[in-house]
């Protein structure tokens, strides 16, 4: 289920929200910024280093769903994984962290 | 087939494999078989820095005030990093340039090795600033057993590849009788295998071996000690993360077989060897942590925490090249290290880190005995 809402009254643009699932937990994220800062704001610890797509520290398992990269990251992204620091979530997704 | 610095043959370099094809002739980048290496070059060039930009005058005072066992931790790490970058400043060039076949990869190797020479120069800059006689520090690197044991592990794969490529370039494939060495078999498959293991070993060097030292440098800086050093280490860590991506790309390109089908077979056959290289390096780094803390630990770090961190990053790096993690530790025992490793805020201006009044939310570490007089438990 992908939700749309008018987040701010002074903003004509609709905010598209997608659900990120991991284990028993979930979070709604927007397409305005990459996944990593949104997870962090929700208090989820994600491993990171460069935060610009070349070190692959923030690599997470992408079990299902679709993400895009506005610019192709320099790091090698294994198939079935995503780079949280630069991936824009484009559908509801299910992810798994390294520690589970 | 001997190496030529300007191969006169006419061939389509877009059809060459990364290694062991034709020697590169024209250094052209208008067309690229693997454009990632050109992108890595551009990124590395954008990172350019010089050690002299970082002021180390307060590090000298800090160093003199460190406890003796803390000075041991600090200097030992510098010695070990000096060893690692001495190897990395020359070996990619010596080992890989004679066998590389793509211009963009050739230039990436040169750019990569060059940035390692900046790291070496920065260790001299640090050592010269904190001790009166740098010779004492540098001379110990070749005699200190804890360090030389690691030197053997980091250089043996390079040395073997270099020896085999030398024989291949002078005598070609076949069984060669070398005086004092007996018969040495040189086949293309064995050469490629030696190459694959060398890249894997370099990957491990840059992925794991540096990080124990990085953690210690940042642990000092968390106590606002040796902050100039930490700034330099931050810049080095940023470069190393990029180099690591470079070797991960090489390994993954080899393993998927699209570049050279035989390489995919070799990558598969070498899987256990690569796992062994990872495990051996992790164990050596844990031994190194124990050596560092043999006379006492420092605030926030001890041999046990560092060993858990080694397990943790080893797992992460193995996963990055498609291997199963081999250690139990599943969470980062020192998550604070990430805010030091992050590269988007590399700053060298003194007011950013050293002057506490410049910072918001800074905790003052200048406490005296009397500050706790009215403190009851």
Image (spheres, coloured by chain):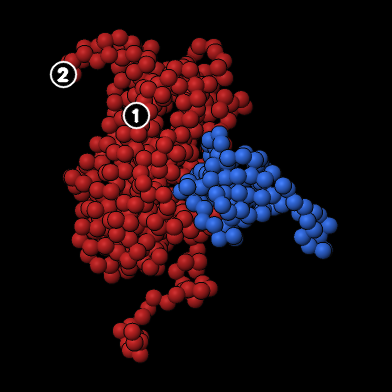
**Colour for chain A in the figure:** blue
Of B286 and B85, which appears nearest the observer? B286
Mark 2 highlights which residue? B180
Q: Determine if residue B193 is in view.
A: yes
Secondary element under disc 1, as helix, strand or loop, is helix
Of A95 and A13, which appears nearest the observer? A95
Circle 1 or circle 2, nearest the eye: 1
| Tally of marks | 2
Instruction: Supply the letter of whichever chain is red.
Output: B
Residue drawn 54% across and 57% down? A44
Q: Which chain carries label 1?
A: B
In the current view of this chain or complex, which residue is farthest to the front? A24
Q: Position of residue B30 (x, y in %)?
A: 62, 27
Residue drawn 24% across and 36% down? B152
- Where residue A53 sits, quadrant-wise, is top right
Of B47 and B285, which appears nearest the observer? B285
Q: Position of residue B346 (x, y in %)?
A: 51, 56
What is the spatial separation of the Cα atoms under label 1 and label 2, in whole angstroms?
A: 31 Å
In the current view of this chain or complex, which residue is farthest to the top? B174
Q: Position of residue B192 (x, y in %)?
A: 38, 20
The image shows residue B250, relative to residue B208, as above or below, that is above
Mark 1 highlights which residue? B272
For residue B96, the mark is none
Residue drawn 20% across and 61% down? B295
- Mark 2 Cα-neighbour bin, 10 Å: few <14, some 14–19, many ≥20: few
- Where residue B170 sits, quadrant-wise, is top left
The image shows residue B360, relative to residue B117, as above or below, that is below
- Where residue B38 sits, quadrant-wise, is top right
Q: Determine if residue B43 is in view.
A: no
Q: Is residue B232 left or right of residue A88?
A: left
Task: Verify CB contact (< 8 Å) between mark 1 and mark 2.
Answer: no
Secondary element under disc 2, as helix, strand or loop, is loop
């Amino acid at each position: 289920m992908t939700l749309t809402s008018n987040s701010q009254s002074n903003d004509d643009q609709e905010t598209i929200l997608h659900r990120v699932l991991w284990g028993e937990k979930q979070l709604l994220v927007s397409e305005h910024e990459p996944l990593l800062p949104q997870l962090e704001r929700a208090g989820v610890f994600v491993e990171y280093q460069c935060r610009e797509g070349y070190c692959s520290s923030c690599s997470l398992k992408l079990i299902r769903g679709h993400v895009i990269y506005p610019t192709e990251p320099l790091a090698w992204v294994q198939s079935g994984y995503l780079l949280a620091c630069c991936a824009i979530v484009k559908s509801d997704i299910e992810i798994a962290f390294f520690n589970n | 087939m001997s190496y030529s610095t300007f191969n006169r043959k006419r061939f389509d370099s877009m059809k060459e494999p990364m290694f062991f094809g034709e020697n590169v002739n024209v250094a052209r980048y208008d067309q690229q078989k693997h454009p990632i290496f050109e992108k890595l070059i551009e990124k590395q060039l954008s990172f350019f820095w010089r050690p002299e930009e970082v002021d180390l005058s307060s590090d000298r005072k800090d160093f003199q005030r460190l406890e003796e066992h803390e000075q041991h931790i600090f200097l030992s790490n510098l010695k070990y990093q000096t060893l690692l970058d001495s190897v990395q400043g020359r070996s990619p060039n010596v080992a890989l340039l004679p066998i590389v076949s793509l211009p963009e990869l050739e230039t990436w190797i040169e750019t990569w090795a060059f940035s390692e020479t900046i790291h070496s120069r920065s260790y001299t800059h640090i050592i010269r600033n904190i001790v009166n006689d740098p010779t004492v520090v540098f001379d110990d690197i070749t005699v200190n057993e804890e360090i030389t044991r690691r030197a053997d592990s980091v250089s043996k794969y390079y040395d073997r590849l270099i020896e085999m490529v030398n024989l291949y370039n002078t005598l070609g494939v076949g069984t060669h009788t070398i005086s004092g060495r007996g018969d040495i078999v040189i086949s293309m498959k064995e050469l490629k295998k030696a190459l694959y293991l060398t890249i894997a070993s370099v990957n491990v060097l840059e992925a794991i071996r540096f990080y124990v030292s990085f953690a210690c440098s940042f642990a000092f800086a968390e106590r606002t000690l040796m902050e100039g050093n930490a700034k330099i280490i931050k810049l080095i860590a940023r470069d190393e993360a990029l180099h690591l991506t470079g070797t991960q790309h090489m390994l993954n390109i080899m393993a998927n077989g699209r570049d050279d089908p035989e390489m995919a077979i070799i990558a598969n056959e070498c899987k256990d060897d690569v796992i062994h290289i990872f495990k051996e390096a992790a164990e050596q780094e844990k031994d190194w942590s124990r050596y560092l803390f043999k006379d006492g630990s420092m605030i926030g770090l001890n041999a046990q925490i560092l060993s858990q961190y080694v397990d943790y990053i080893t797992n992460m790096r193995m996963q990055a090249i498609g291997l199963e993690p081999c250690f139990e530790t599943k969470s980062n025992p020192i998550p604070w290290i990430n805010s030091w490793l992050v590269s988007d805020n590399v700053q060298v201006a003194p007011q950013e880190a050293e002057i506490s009044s410049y910072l918001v939310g800074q905790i003052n570490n200048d406490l005296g005995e009397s500050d706790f007089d009215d403190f009851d438990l």
